[in-house]
Structures are given as C-alpha cells and as structure tokens.
Amino acid sequence: MSLLELENVTLKFGGVTAVDDVSFAVEEGEVFALVGPNGAGKSTIFNLISRIYDPFAGDIRFQGQSLLDRQPYEIAGLGIARTFQNIELFEQASVLQNLLVGRHKHRKSNPVGEMFFTPFVRREEKRHRKAVEEVIDFLDLQPYREKFIAGLPYGVRKVVEMGRALAIEPKLLLLDEPASGLSVEETQDVAFWIEDIKKLMGITVLMVEHDMSLVSAVSDRVMALADGRMLAIGTPEEVQRDPKVIEAYIGS
Ligand code: ADP
Ligand code: MG
C-alpha cells in the first residue's frame, strides 16, 4: 500500500480545470516532487490533500483510507502536515510560540483535564515542549527562539514555516516551494534538511518546487504537470529530459 494515493482526481474553478484527471502515488520513505509552470495545479493538489477543496471526481487515500470523508481540521491529526507557498505564521508571537501552537491545535487532551492541570496534562505539555525544542535544534533556530516572527528576515521565516509543520511529527510532510525566495546558501540548507527529514526522521516528503537543482538533489521521483495534467513521472533525470516537459517549460 502506498502512503498517499491520488486516483483520477479532477477539480474545476469555473471554466478552469485546475487539476485534470491526475493520478499518482507517494511511497512511504520517499521524497516526491511536483514540478511544472505557474498555474499547473501544484498548490491546488496540496489544497485537495489538505481537504480545503473537494474534488469533482476521483479519490485521495492516505494509508489506504479515503480522505474524502475527513474534515480539514482532521488532516494534521492523521499525520499530514504542510507548509504554505505564502508563509502562514502568527506575526506577533515568538518562534517557540508558533511551533507550540502548531502542536496544540492537534493534541488529544480534554479541556477539563487542562483546567485542573492533571499529571496527564503536565506529561503532555512536556512532550510538546520536547518535540518543539528538537525541531528548533534541528533547524538551527536557537538564536531566534524567543524572537517575534514580524521582525525576522524572510529566509528565517521560511525555516520557521517548515518547523511549524515538522513540530507536529507528521508521517507525510507537504512542502510548497520550500526554496522560493531563498539564497543559494539557504537553499543548500533546505536540501540538507530534507535529506535528514527523510533519512533520520523517517518522514515521507511531497514537495512542490521550481528550483530544479534542489529537486534533482533530493527527490527520488518527480511528476511534471502543466495545465492541470500530468506530463511525465519518473526519476528527476527522466522527467527533465522528457520532450513534453521541455516543451511545457519553453512554451510557458
Ligand atoms: P501552481 O501552484 O501550479 O502554480 P495553482 O494550483 O495555484 O497552480 O493553480 C492552478 C490553476 O487553478 C490556475 O489556473 C489558478 O488560477 C487556478 N486557481 C487556483 N486556485 C483558485 C481559486 N481558489 N479560485 C479560482 N481559480 C483558482
Ligand atoms: Mg503554487
């Protein structure tokens, strides 16, 4: 069984078919990249997996179970975390607070327990702190731990956005353009982190990315899309030399 499967998924916005009969499967433990020109439907695929949109047709399965009868707020609890192409963080809160909020939204304790601060809640709280501190160390965010998001450079906010998703300890991490707007050095860091997320943390990664050097460096498999349709799927080398892919990029 694949970790994530999209089967003949279609979504239209008015007259535009943003995602047109798309099928692919992401295997546990791999880094899978979606590439394609602007407007190809990549972010829409993430929004479909996150249950922000209902597909017109097709099915989306995670660990063999359809996500279509799940609500958006249940998705993170199932083990799917995502970052947004446009960073979505609490501006007037610290890095630490942003990562903790990410976890608290998905925790399983009950409000009565919280009121009385039971030993269970205290243990849970410790676990949240520990997971978040590990992410802060892993992403070298220690110098920014107490700093408000509003005052941080773009490159650091981008890393915090990734940290917020990692802090919920997902099985599947969806990264929407993790390197966009980053310098060559910062992109290099992102490449190393993605390698470690896969190898050390055992998290499966599905990412959308324009930077083909990053895609080639970290991806096991790539799917190229244009105008909502799949053009090619395979290793980064196979997809990059596919004539349909080359044409889509030149024509865009
Ligand atoms: P990508 O991420 O590959 O650049 P998107 O998934 O954002 O592309 O968009 C795919 C197509 O769907 C585009 O034509 C875009 O204009 C359209 N689209 C995306 N979201 C919406 C929306 N909420 N309403 C209307 N059209 C949308
Ligand atoms: Mg996009």
Image: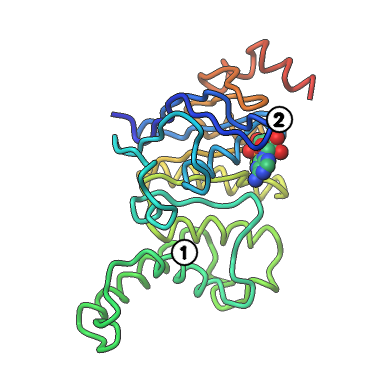
Where does ligand 1 appear, by image quarter?
top right
Q: Residue furthest bottom?
A: 116
Residue 86 drawn above or below residue 194? below
The residue that appears at 26% across and 83% down in the rendered structure is: 112
The residue that appears at 60% across and 47% down in the rendered structure is: 178
Q: Secondary structure at mark 2?
A: loop
Q: Is residue 229 left or right of residue 166?
A: right
The answer, for residue 210, to whether it is visible in the render is no
Query: Is the residue at mark 2 in contact range of ligand 1, meaning its CB lies under 8 Å from it?
Result: yes
**Mark 1 or mark 2, whichever is nearer to me:** 2
Tag 2 residue: 37
Label 2 is placed on what type of residue? Answer: Pro
Task: Assign the N terminus to one quadrant of the image.
Answer: top left
Q: Residue furthest front?
A: 14
Dot label at residue 137: 1
Residue 163 drawn above or below residue 114? above
